[in-house]
Amino acid sequence: MRNVLSWRVALDQGLEPRVYPYTADKVPIGTMQAKLDFKIWSKKTIGINCYFTSQSTGQKFQLTVFRNELTKEYIIKGGTLDFAICPIEIVYQIEVGVNAKQRVLFLAATPI
């Protein structure tokens, strides 16, 4: 079952998406363990914004998973985890990178 919130529902639940930055200068880069706090449908693209907290630093940040045009699933390229239905409030081993345009790339995620 999908467990992705709308923006309005997230705010009504008292969640604070604005405290989770998404730019390359504020998102930790590399491989880390992070708890997936909640997910919200993206307003600007066909995707899911995932709101994480780093286990080692407590830093909050967001990463976006885009919908695959062919399968209609929200899976990171080369992965198997569908973010439309994956559990929240658990820790994932994630990998984050940056492209040549300094945009954050969500490269991998595995529940641990």
Image (tube, rainbow, N blue to C red):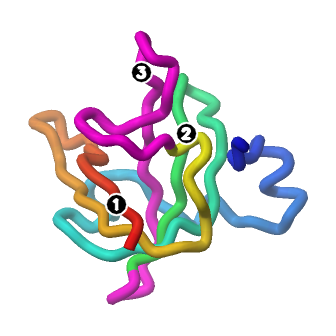
User: Which one is closest to the eye, mark 1 or mark 3?
Assistant: 1
Q: Could you tell me which residue is drawn at 27 percent across and 51 percent down?
A: 108
Q: Specify start and end residues of the magenta stretch as a single range.
A: 55-82
Q: Which mark is residue 68?
A: 3
Rendered position, 28 above or below 66: below
Asked if residue 20 lies left or right of residue 59, the reply is: right
Going by the numbered disc 2, the residue's amino acid type is Ile
Which of the two labelled residues, at mark 1 and mark 3, occupies the earlier sequence position?
Answer: 3
In terms of secondary structure, what is the magenta stretch mainly?
loop
Q: Which residue is mark 2?
A: 48
Q: Could you tell me which residue is drawn at 45 percent across and 17 percent down?
A: 71
Mark 3 lies on a secondary structure that is: loop
**Residue 52 placement (x, y as % from top left):** 48, 66
Dots 1, 3 in contact, CB < 8 A = no
Which of the two labelled residues, at mark 1 and mark 2, occupies the earlier sequence position?
Answer: 2
Alpha carbon distance from label 2 to label 3: 12 Å
Asked if residue 13 lies left or right of residue 63, the reply is: right
Asked if residue 40 lies left or right of residue 48, the reply is: right
Q: Could you tell me which residue is drawn at 41 percent across and 11 percent down?
A: 70
Pick the quarter of the image with the C terminus. bottom left
Going by the numbered disc 3, the residue's amino acid type is Asn
Q: Which mark is residue 31?
A: none
**Residue 60 placement (x, y as % from top left):** 47, 72
Asked if residue 62 lies left or right of residue 3, the reply is: left
Pick the quarter of the image with the N terminus. top right
- Local packing at callout 3 (Cα closer than 10 Å; few below 14, some 14-19, many 20+) is some
Rendered position, 56 above or below 6: below
Q: Which residue is mark 1?
A: 110
User: Which one is closest to the eye, mark 2 or mark 3?
Assistant: 3
